[in-house]
């Protein structure tokens, strides 16, 4: 009895030792998770109970292909909670990331890998419009639909931003924010006049053109790497009484026609009027031109007529309405006022590309790949080509170096997207269909002549390429600022800005 008891003890301690030596990282990750939970409890930061309904909601990414398990999910309701949560992450030695709408294609709001502290901001989503100054104060966890809804209802105002009501104002604004108003009104970050940021050392600072201007420059393009923005201050514009949205289908059945059609669209994009916003939408079975015009039907028809003639396009939809009608239309009809509880998801892989005007060889490569490899592939893919720049684009107006957004001078912004139905596992070779699309276009392009959009990230590229492709000519300055505000890279994720190093 005694000897079997002591040999059992021996056995147990043997297994414990084995556990300790064989899986040290798991054990220490468990230690970190526990230490983090203890710290957050001690300073009274609200958290989601692991496994609870809220945890499920907050830790499920928009892109179901990329699940990551956080070390903890903090759900602050005050700036102090955010400061304390960041202090806990620092103390325990885990990475921390803000999460707003959770719409990052790479699930970067969850840290883009396991074991991060997620600071879920969506309980902080007040929107206040000062009708005297037209300045909107927007809390860092608001979703775009909620912001648009509030600004309209509080004073018939808006700023320029993207289309999906569930997208967070956080990730969206801090990295660009392109939408169906951008050719007329610029990027979301162009409307930002100030922000309140919690830095990695837990201090709270304001930034604007006159206060901490370097930080203000950096958060307008690379904000996720610099701190947690608790409050945005946007200028706004009075919404137009009437806008007109449209869809035109183009029947390009052969490569020759697609080349001619695309070339006509490109010529048009270079000088199209400021009031017109347009993109091309290519799927395996159809191609559309679609967009928004600041004006009425007759005005739009006059502007589009020459292009429709050259492309054989026919208008399938043309409708004039008020501001919220177009918000609803481009939001695919879902309710505009989205807040905590939003539950739309997709399973997909995506990548992106900015280019200048394509020369004939590059245009031919694009069309060849489209017709010879993509068109016949009945996967559920699409390519969206935003007419981003050009002579009359509000995106191209500000100085290229006025914010950290590095791509104002590019004509096209491409999004490549390949999805499967929910519940279907994502096949590995799904990656190459869209990736090869990009590689075929960029193969003989100079690195200066293309880039990628961090809001349409390609989670499959390494950190060096990611930094170069997303921030191009602004990377050196961003890394200097990063070193000042977050030298230990607390806000790390696999494609973020790295602090400048000595060598
Ligand atoms: C359905 C859909 C439609 C889209 N449409 C458009 C479009 O029309 N135009 C366009 O430009 N983009 C569009 N996007 C891309 C979108 O802009 C990006 O995915 C954006 O980063 C999402 O922001 P988020 O706050 O929802 O994401 P999250 O995953 O919560 O965050 C994304 C990144 O931003 C950081 N972050 C978020 N909030 C803060 C904050 N307050 N302070 C500091 N860092 C923060 C996170 O840490 C993370 O790195 C779309 C995406 C989806 C899924
Ligand atoms: C930041 O600016 C806001 C709005 O002007 C102000 O209320 C707040 O006190 C400022 N915070 C700091 C830390 O300066
Ligand atoms: C438009 O239609 C005409 C007549 O069928 C055809 O010759 C031309 O190639 C088409 N152009 C495009 C871009 O589809
Ligand atoms: C172009 O696409 C084809 C087909 O997918 C692929 O085999 C080829 O490697 C791609 N070319 C480049 C330069 O990536
Ligand atoms: C926090 O970091 C900022 C940016 O580096 C610095 O200016 C500030 O002095 C720091 N605050 C404290 C309390 O250390």
Image (tube, rainbow, N blue to C red):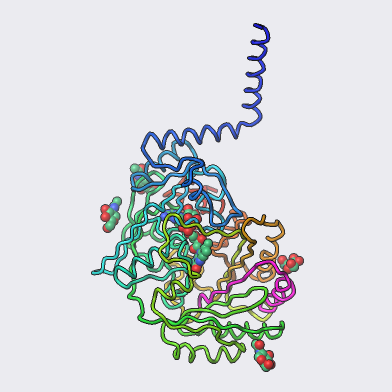
State whether residue 335 is above or below residue 68.
Answer: below
In this view, the residue in front, 146 or 343, is 343
In this view, the residue in front, 76 or 469, is 76
Number of marks in the rendered image = 0
State whether residue 313 is above or below residue 366.
Answer: below
Q: Residue at x 41, y 61 (%)?
A: 217
State whether residue 289 is above or below residue 171.
Answer: below
Left or right: residue 111 versus residue 296 is right
> Which quadrant holds the N terminus?
top right
Q: Can residue 52 be seen in this view?
A: yes
Left or right: residue 155 versus residue 12 is left
**Residue 444's spot in the image, x, y percent?**
68, 71
Left or right: residue 134 versus residue 484 is left
Is residue 191 found inside the magenta-colored segment of the image?
no
Is residue 365 found inside the magenta-colored segment of the image?
yes
Quarter of the render that holds ligand 2: bottom left
Residue 5 in which image quadrant: top right
The magenta segment is 363-389
Residue at the extreme left = 132
Q: Is residue 478 visible?
A: no
**Residue 183's spot in the image, x, y percent?**
46, 77
**Residue 107's spot in the image, x, y percent?**
54, 54
């Amino acid at each position: 009895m005694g000897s079997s008891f002591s040999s059992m003890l021996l056995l147990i301690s043997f297994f414990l030792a084995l556990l300790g030596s064989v899986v040290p990282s798991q054990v220490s990750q468990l230690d970190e998770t526990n230490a983090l939970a203890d710290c957050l409890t001690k300073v009274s930061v609200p958290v989601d109970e692991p496994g609870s309904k809220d945890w499920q909601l907050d830790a499920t990414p928009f892109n179901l292909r990329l699940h990551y398990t956080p070390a903890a999910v903090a759900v602050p309701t005050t700036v102090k909670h955010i400061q304390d949560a960041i202090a806990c992450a620092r103390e325990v030695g885990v990475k921390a990331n803000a999460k707003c709408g959770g719409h990052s294609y790479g699930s970067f709001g969850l840290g883009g890998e396991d074991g991060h502290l997620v600071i879920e901001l969506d309980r902080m989503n007040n929107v206040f419009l000062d009708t005297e100054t037209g300045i909107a104060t927007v809390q860092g966890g608001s979703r775009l639909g909620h912001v648009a809804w509030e600004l309209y209802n509080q004073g018939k105002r808006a700023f320029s931003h993207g289309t999906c009501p569930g997208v967070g104002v956080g990730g969206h604004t801090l990295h660009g924010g392109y939408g169906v108003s951008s050719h007329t009104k610029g990027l979301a970050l162009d409307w930002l006049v100030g922000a309140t940021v919690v830095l990695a050392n837990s201090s709270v600072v304001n930034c604007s053109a006159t206060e901490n201007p370097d930080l203000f420059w950096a958060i307008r393009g690379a904000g996720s790497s610099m701190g947690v923005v608790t409050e945005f201050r946007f200028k706004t514009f009075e919404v137009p009484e009437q806008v007109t949205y449209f869809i035109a289908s183009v029947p390009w059945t052969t490569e020759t026609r697609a080349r001619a059609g695309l070339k006509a669209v490109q010529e048009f994009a270079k000088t199209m009027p400021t009031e017109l916003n347009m993109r091309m939408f290519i799927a395996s079975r159809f191609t559309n031109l679609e967009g928004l015009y600041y004006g009425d039907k007759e005005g739009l028809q006059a502007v589009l007529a020459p292009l429709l003639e050259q492309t054989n396009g026919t208008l399938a939809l043309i409708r004039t309405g008020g501001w919220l009608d177009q918000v609803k239309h481009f939001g695919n009809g879902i309710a505009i006022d989205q807040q905590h509880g939003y539950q739309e998801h997709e399973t997909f892989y995506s990548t992106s590309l900015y280019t200048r005007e394509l020369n004939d060889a590059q245009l031919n490569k694009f069309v060849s790949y489209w017709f010879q490899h993509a068109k016949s592939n009945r996967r559920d893919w699409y390519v969206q080509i935003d007419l981003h720049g050009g002579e009359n684009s509000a995106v191209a107006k500000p100085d290229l170096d006025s914010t950290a957004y590095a791509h104002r001078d590019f004509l096209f912004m491409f999004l490549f997207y390949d999805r499967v139905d929910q519940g279907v596992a994502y096949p590995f070779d799904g990656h190459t269909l869209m990736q090869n699309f990009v590689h075929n276009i960029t193969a003989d392009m100079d690195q200066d002549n293309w880039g990628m959009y961090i809001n349409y990230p390609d989670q499959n590229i390494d950190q060096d390429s990611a930094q170069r492709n997303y921030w191009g000519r602004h990377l050196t300055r961003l890394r200097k600022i990063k070193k000042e505000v977050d030298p230990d890279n607390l806000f790390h994720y696999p494609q973020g800005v790295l602090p400048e190093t000595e060598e």
